[in-house]
Image (tube, rainbow, N blue to C red):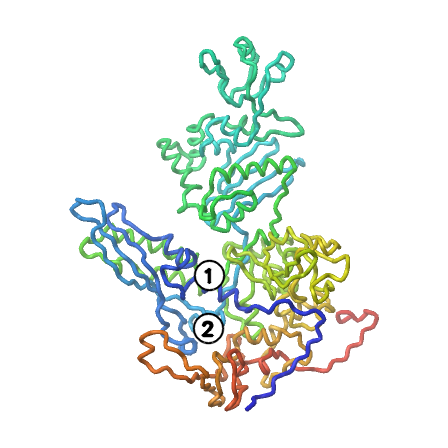
Amino acid sequence: MKGKKKIERHSFARIPQAIDYPNLLEVQLKSFQDFLQEHVSPEKRENKGLQAVFNSVFPISDSAGNYELQFVEYYLDKPKYSERECQERGVSYAVPLKARMRLAIKDVTGETDNFTEFIEQDVYLGNMPYMTARGTFIINGAERVIVSQLHRSPGVFFSDTLHPNGTPIYSARIIPFRGSWVEFTTDVNDVMYVYIDRKKKFPVTMLLRAIGFSTVEDIVNAFEESEEVTIQLENMPNLVGQMLAADVVDFSTGEVIAEQGKNITQEILDQFLELGIQKVKIVRPSDVNSPNLVLNTLRKDTAKTEAEAIEAIYRQLRSGEPPDIDTARALIERMFFNEKRYDLGAVGRYRINKKLNLDIPYDTTVLTREDIIAILKYLIGMREGHNPSDDIDHLGNRRVRTVGEQLASQFNVGFARMARTIKERMNIGDAEKLTPQDLVNARTISSVINTFFGTSQLSQFMDQTNPLAELTHKRRLSALGPGGLTRERAGFEVRDVHYTHYGRLCPIETPEGPNIGLISSLCVHARINDFGFIETPYRKVVNGRVTKEIEYLSATEEDSYTIAQVNAPIDEKGNFLNDRVKARRKGDFPVVPPEKIEYMDVATNQIVSPAASLIPFLEHDDANRALMGSNMQRQAVPLMVPEAPIVGTGMEGKVARDSGTMVIAEEDGVVEYVDAEKIVIKMDKPPQPKSGKERLMELSDRKEYKLLKFIRTNQDSTINQRPLVVEGQHVKKGDILADGCATDQGELALGRNVLVAFMPWHGYNFEDA
């Protein structure tokens, strides 16, 4: 038996697509799976997402060290109600989160210092909203979407501004995931200062002395700013006033004649000549053409020893005298070199390593002395005109916080609160009666998570007008939200299209009005990598020949390559037909010989979002009208009798399928029963039991699909699924069994095919004129 006749499409495309469309909901689904690592056995889970949150908080011990609460593993139970029941009852679709905890107790007698007693229990940590297969969450019966956020990436940013008097001011700002912001800047007099948390200011050399570069010699050697000079009568006037970069020692007695850091005077020079000292090491002198910022800063620095520097910084940060030098040193240590207080994250470390050519391991997520020296060297290079400043709107400097990461930061907050109550309970608890369940309060975490899903600016009521509206909402990126920009503060540059948006963020689909450019949509082939940067695919070109190999490049990686357009003519073997090829490199469009090409675009619609690629002949549209068209397709209300477009772009089926509004066959089989409310399929291969429990039950070889009939959506339109198959029809895995709203034969159908006559008149009737 055959079902309804499938729509036959004929492609008139001149340029074939080199790669299939990815799953358009991957942004949401993959992020949530990586966060939970649900199908990975506990001992094999990577240190990311929820696992990383547990690892960072536990073990928790009391102040005396008698108790220690250790984390063993976490697991999820089955949800209480199905998705449909949750919507009907007005409750959240959530799974119970449980963790196995071990309480270690020390011997009360005090004979040994080891833990002697262990109590292991499963502890309930609250209900966690669970993502549906459509990439949504059901909160209090309503479907919600967590929108991904585009924010400034942790790492180091170099910038330059002009002082009112015309002098360029250079600055390097280190932005961590959590911890104090540190900024190094130069001033009008070429002195380098450091700002901590944008308010406390002191010379850079003071910080360097405090973190181990205690002498002028150490500092000058770190920057290679010393030079050896021979003392002669003719150059003696030039040496007066220079700073010594090393101690000058009388070799006969071993006595130090002049200490490093001292300025040379005429008396000191006479003494050198008397003792027959011919060579001394000085800090490279500063002149107009090449100022020595290190020397200028040393001269400005009031602290001359490590202890003085540490005390001065403590006074700045705590506005009071330090009780002793160790307390002051511990404060500085805690601020930048302690993993609990300061965290660059893997992303921040990756970006600092890349920018400054360092090879510090990725798990070192605190600042190191090498980082600080390398940053200051880059800053000096900027002052000397060798190093460029960073472009803040470049997509290599902005990253995406997906659902998983946003949830992880909420769990971090919840667990930190829980850890405080656990410590309090340990301190006042009775030794004989304490168990892990007594210590943990599940409500703490639940309240933080529920607040996030209910009130966060990025947790939004899903736009459910039609399948395209749903899909677009899940693929949206917002620069607003906690830790992001505000509409009032965002200037023109942030909103503008940047050359790195190519193949990553759609240049067309963005709202009109106050949010323009702040809310954007992910391109069709774009994906988000492990560091949160947006990547886009390219075909590799080797020796002027296009290969079938596909590589995903982030914006920073792409900057060093020359990339051909997708419409460059090539033969069957992949050789370019023209001897000059139009290409892109950074923000430029050179025309180069084929040998210079390193990559090639994969598809003509690579640069736009799914909504914009549903517009046929998009290239002939005026950009402003294309923007309105992309946005207005999302406002089409589903019709009683949907009608697929006669002229499509080949994207209709993909959008309809990935939006999750249709019923899709999970296995091969034969349709055994069909009516308006359910479809029953007898599977070709009966399911194999996976566990002992399943072996005892008889697994059915029939799969029943319930159809949604006249369900109310968030926008008060209706979802009504209609079967497409007939009894006796053979279906394959992935075939469409039933249409949803606004789909026809498995294709998106937003409106009607209308006959339109259009008469241009020399362009005078452009836009309603």
Mark 2 or mark 1: whose residue is earlier in sequence: 2
Residue 428 visible in the displayed image: yes
Q: Position of residue 482 (x, y in %)?
A: 50, 56
Side of 427 where 716 appears, left or right: right
Is 229 or 297 nearer to us in this picture? Answer: 229
Q: Where is residue 462 in the image (x, y as percent from the top left)?
A: 51, 70
Label 2 neighbour load within 10 Å: few <14, some 14-19, many 20+: some
Is 698 or 268 nearer to us in this picture? Answer: 698
Q: Is label 2 in a helix, a strand or a loop? A: strand
Q: Where is residue 684 in the image (x, y as percent from the top left)?
A: 46, 84
Which corner quadrant holds the N terminus? bottom right
Label 1 neighbour load within 10 Å: few <14, some 14-19, many 20+: many
Q: Which residue is drawn at 65% across and 35% down?
A: 167
Residue 56 vertical position relative to residue 98 in the rendered view, above or below: above
**Which residue type carries mark 1?**
Gly
Residue 16 falls in image quadrant: bottom right
Q: Which residue lies furthest to the front in this view?
A: 573
Q: Distance between the residues labelled 2 and 1?
A: 20 Å
Residue 683 vertical position relative to residue 290 in the rendered view, above or below: below
Side of 389 where 46 appears, left or right: left
Q: Do the residues labelled 2 and 1 touch (CB within 8 Å)?
A: no
Q: Which residue is drawn at 23% across and 47% down?
A: 114
**Which residue type carries mark 2?**
Ala
Residue 130 vertical position relative to residue 399 in the rendered view, above or below: below
Residue 515 visible in the displayed image: no
Is 590 or 139 nearer to us in this picture? Answer: 590
Q: Mark 1 points at which residue?
A: 404
Q: Where is residue 230 in the image (x, y as percent from the top left)?
A: 59, 17
Q: Name the residue under label 2.
A: 142
